[in-house]
Amino acid sequence: MALPISSNDLLRIFNRLDKNKDGLICVQELKWLLDTIGIQLTMEELESFLEKPSLDFDEFLFFYESISKQNKGECKGGLVDEHGDEEEDVEIVYMAFKVFDVNGDGFISCEELENVLSRLELWDANRSEVDCRSMIRAYDTNLDGKLDFEEFMNMMLFTN
């Protein structure tokens, strides 16, 4: 499966989550990330899904791919309704969209994307605005320079 987020970016995310630099991220660190992007799960749900107290990088990649497959409807069970409830998937993506749509205008601008990624410690200060614009351009089907919900959903569901 081609990852819409590069392995290098996933490694950067993993390393930022791995606060004690032991090569593992614990359930609490992963929950913090999910909470920050607007995906609300209880510790019990996350622990049940992971079936272990921490993940190494390869397991983190597997977790990411599992979530991606669930969002595409390729996988049943786990974090989404076992019947593949499309409405629930849309609701989760919408919650994430609202996190990025800081000013609530219904669009995600380059500035908003950079702001949220910075808060998540996923944006390096020395990256340029061009990087941000190219991230948006990849899914900006109407070429207005920002992402509306439909474009964001296509990005999250990896269908461009």
Image (cartoon, rainbow, N blue to C red):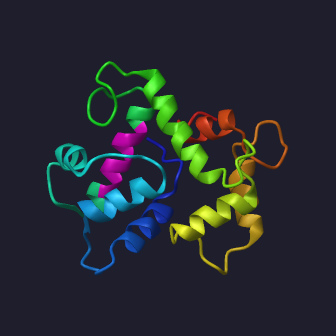
Q: Residue furthest top?
A: 83
Residue 70 is situated, as x and y percent measured from the top left of the image, at 38, 33
Q: Is residue 63 magenta?
A: yes
In the orientation shown, which residue stands out farthest toward the front? 104
Look at 33% across and 78% down and name the residue there: 19
Q: Quick check: 58 above or below 138?
A: below
Magenta-drawn segment? 60-68
Q: Position of residue 14 (x, y in %)?
A: 38, 66
Determine whether, in the image, residue 81 is placed left or right of residue 100.
left
Q: Is residue 71 magenta?
A: no
Q: Quadrant of the C terminus?
A: top right
Q: Which residue is depicted at the point 57% across and 51% down?
A: 99
Residue 54, given in percent of the width and then of the height, sits at 20, 62
Toward the viewer: 11 or 86? 86
Q: Quick one: 156 or 92, which is closer to the camera?
A: 92
* Residue 72 appears in the figure: no
Residue drawn 43% across and 27% down?
88
Between 11 and 28, the one nearer to me in the picture: 28
110 in relation to 107, above or below: below
